[in-house]
Image: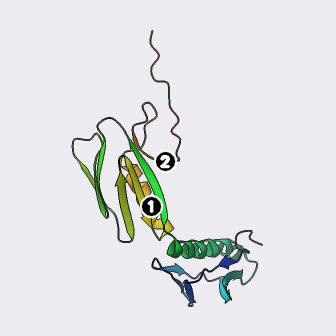
Amino acid sequence: MSRIGKLPIDVPTGVTITVDSDVITVKGPKGELTVPHLSDVTVTLEGTQAIVARKDDERIAKAQHGLQRALLNNAVDGVVKEFEKKLEVNGVGFRVNGGGQAIDMQLGFSHPVKYEAPAGVTLAVEKMTITVSGIDKQQVGQVAAEIRALKKPEPYKGKGIKYTDEVVLRKAGKAGK
């Protein structure tokens, strides 16, 4: 039995889950998300809980059991409270401006770098910290990874864009004579 898959999902008040044959729709106060309904699992609603069960003990069904529960739980969490990731920009001469759907950055290149966020994701800038937030956990993580990839932190001076909880291992550099 999947350790994650067997846990019931608590559905808070104000959230409705609609189960169809190919898609599961989750509506809440923050918005609406759809999750694909995997073929080898069933989702049933019992009171204020959603329960994910697999149809048989085949290998693919075991794999889909935990995945379906995790995707559905993330959708329920997202429509209740938004997910967010924070990024720090470190470096002499590096600047970040903007917010909302687009940010402008000076990252040590010969040109300014613009980043447009997709619909459903908002960007907030406070000093040298970028906050990426939205209701879709996968999309928030993807946008944060794309912004970080513009200038990854380097190991000698630590310049670049990193997650706030990320630890950049520093190297010693050249040894003098």
Q: Pinpoint residue 122: horizontal percent, then vertical percent.
A: 37, 65
Q: Pinpoint residue 65: horizontal percent, then vertical percent.
A: 68, 75
Circle 1 packing at 10 Å, graded few (<14), some (14-19), many (20+), is few
Task: Identify the residue under disc 2.
Answer: 164
Q: Pinpoint residue 71: horizontal percent, then vertical percent.
A: 58, 73
Is any part of residue 115 visible from this angle?
no
Q: Residue at x 44, y 30 (%)?
A: 156
Tell me which numbered mark, 1 or 2, is placed earlier along the sequence: 1
The residue lying furthest to the left in this view is 111
Q: Pinpoint residue 136: horizontal percent, then vertical percent.
A: 48, 70
Q: Residue at x 62, y 83 (%)?
A: 39
Q: Nearer the viewer, mark 1 or mark 2?
A: 2
Q: Nearer the viewer, residue 39 or 48?
A: 48
Q: Which mark is residue 142?
A: 1
Is any part of residue 158 visible from this angle?
yes
Asked if residue 125 is positioned above or below residue 51 in the image, the reply reads above
Q: Residue at x 54, y 75 (%)?
A: 75
- Which quadrant of the view contains residue 139? bottom left
Describe the colour scheme in one phrase: rainbow
What's the distance in space between the residues labelled 1 and 2, CA to CA? 16 Å
Instruction: Inspect the image, locate mark 1, and give the three-letter code of the amino acid beneath it.
Output: Gln
Q: Is residue 78 found left or right of 91 in the rendered image?
A: right
